[in-house]
Amino acid sequence: MKRKCKYCDGSMEGKMPRAKFCSGTCRANYFYAKGGRSTPPNSNDKEHNEESSPSKKPVQALKGVIDDQPITPQPEKQPNPVYQKLGKLVKRCESIRAKLLQQKEHLLRKRQEVQKTHSWLLPTVGMLSGTAIAQKFTKNGWLQLFIGGGLGLAAGYLTNYYNNEKAEQERAIKIKQLDNQLKALAIEEKANEDELGHYTLEWFKTPRFLTPETKPIEESQEQQLNGEPPLVPIEPPNLNEKIISSGQLKQMNFKSLNFTGKWETLVGKPSINFHAVIHGKPGQGKSHLSVQFAKYLAFNFGRVIYISSEEGLSKTLRDKFVFNNAFHKGLHIADLHSFEEVMEELESNTYHFVFVDSLDDMGIDAAKLKILRERFKNSGLITISQSTKSGRARGSQQIIHDCDIAIKVEDGIAFIVKNRFEGNGEYEIFG
C-alpha cells in the first residue's frame, strides 16, 4: 500500500519510512490548521508591526548575559613515587605468575602424552600378515586361516614386547626429565609468590599520594626512579599578551548566554559570540528551527538579523514567521544573496546575532566564513547548510570542525552532532 501525505494526500515516494508529510510546507500547514491559529497579524497592529531600522551606532547592552564562573579545581595531589614503583613490581610478579602457569600446563600435557604412548601397530600387522599367508596356501580352510592369524598376532605381540621394553626405558627417562622441570618450576613459582605477597602487602600499606607529613621527592630523583634522564635547566619564558600562564587563564572571565528550557537542553549555555551550524536535507525543518531560534534570541537576549538568501522576502518565508509567530521589533530580515552583499550592507556591532540562510545558496565556503566570523566577532553567528545524501553537511567539513555547535535536522527533530557547550539533547521542531 502506497503511503500518502498526511495533509495533501500526495505521494510519499522517496521519503523516509517514518516521514508523514511530503514537504515542509505540508507539515507547517497541517500543524497550522490543527492548532486553529488565526490569520497573520494585522499590518496596522502596532505591537507586531513596529519596526526599527538598524542603527549605525553600537547596539545596546546584550540581555540575559551571565558571568561564566571559572571552575575552582581541587588541590592537585602529588603521586607517591614509592606507591607507583610498588605497583609496577606487583604487575611484574603477576605477569611472571601467568607465564609460569602456562609453562606448567605445557609440561603436564607433555607428560600425559608420554605416558599414553603405546604401540598396537605390530600385533595388528602380525595378525593381518599371518592371515594373508595362510589364505595363500589353503583353499577355503577357515581353521587354517584362524590358526595363521593367531600365529601372526602372537608373533606381532612378541616383537612389540621386545620393542616396548626399549621404549619404556626411553619413556621413563623423558618422564623423569619432565618431573625435574616441574620441580624447578615449582621452586620458581614459590619464590615469585613470596615476592608478590611481599610487594602487594607493602603496596596496600603505602599511601597513593604524598601526605603533608611525607617529604615530596625531588624532580631529579623522580625522573631517576622512572628511568628518565634529568632535564637540562632552561631559562624561564617571557610571558606577554600572546603567551599567558595557566594561572592567568584560570582568572579570565568570559560571558555566556543564560539559555533555559529546551534551548538549554539542546545547546547548553553558549558564549555570546558562538558559531552554530544547522544542516539537514530539504523539507526536514531547518528553516523553521532557524526562525524559532531567531525568535527566542530576539525576545530574550538582543537584536537579530535573519539573512534570507534562499527564499528572499517571499510568501513562503512569511508563512514560516506566521506559523512560528516570530514577530518582534528586534528581529529583522535581510534580502541579501551573496557574500559580497553581506559585507557591503551589514556593519559589525550592529546586531547581536546573525543568521545566514544559507551558505550553499550564497556560495560561502570555509575561507569566506572565516572572514564573516571575523567581521561579526562580537556576535553570535548561526549558519544554515544543506546535507548530502549520506547526511553530512554539504561543502567542506572544515566548517563543521571550526564551528562551536553543529545541529542536524531530520524529520522535524533537531539533535546535536557536535557541541562545545555541553548541551546534547533533542528538539522537536513542530511539537
Image: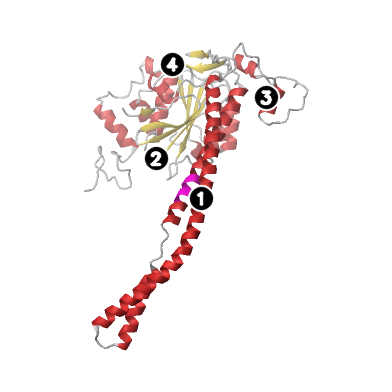
The amino acid type found where label 4 is placed reads Asn
- Residue beneath label 2, please? 282
Q: Are marks 4 and 2 in contact (CB under 8 Å)?
A: no
- The crowding category of the residue bearing disc 4, from other C-alpha atoms within 10 Å (few below 14, some 14 to 19, many at least 20), is some
Of label 3 and label 1, which has the lower sequence position?
A: 1
Of label 4 and label 2, which has the lower sequence position?
A: 2
Q: Is residue 408 visible?
A: yes
- The crowding category of the residue bearing disc 3, from other C-alpha atoms within 10 Å (few below 14, some 14 to 19, many at least 20), is some
Q: Quadrant of residue 16?
A: top left
Of label 2 and label 3, which has the lower sequence position?
A: 3
Disc 3/disc 1 C-alpha distance (Å): 45 Å
Query: Magenta residues: mostly which secondary structure?
Result: helix
The amino acid type found where label 3 is placed reads Glu
Q: Are marks 2 and 3 in contact (CB under 8 Å)?
A: no
Which mark, by number, is residue 300? Answer: 4
The amino acid type found where label 2 is placed reads Pro
Which mark, by number, is residue 222? Answer: 3
Which residues are drawn in magenta?
Answer: 103-109
Of label 1 and label 4, which has the lower sequence position?
A: 1
Of label 1 and label 2, which has the lower sequence position?
A: 1
- Residue beneath label 1, please? 178
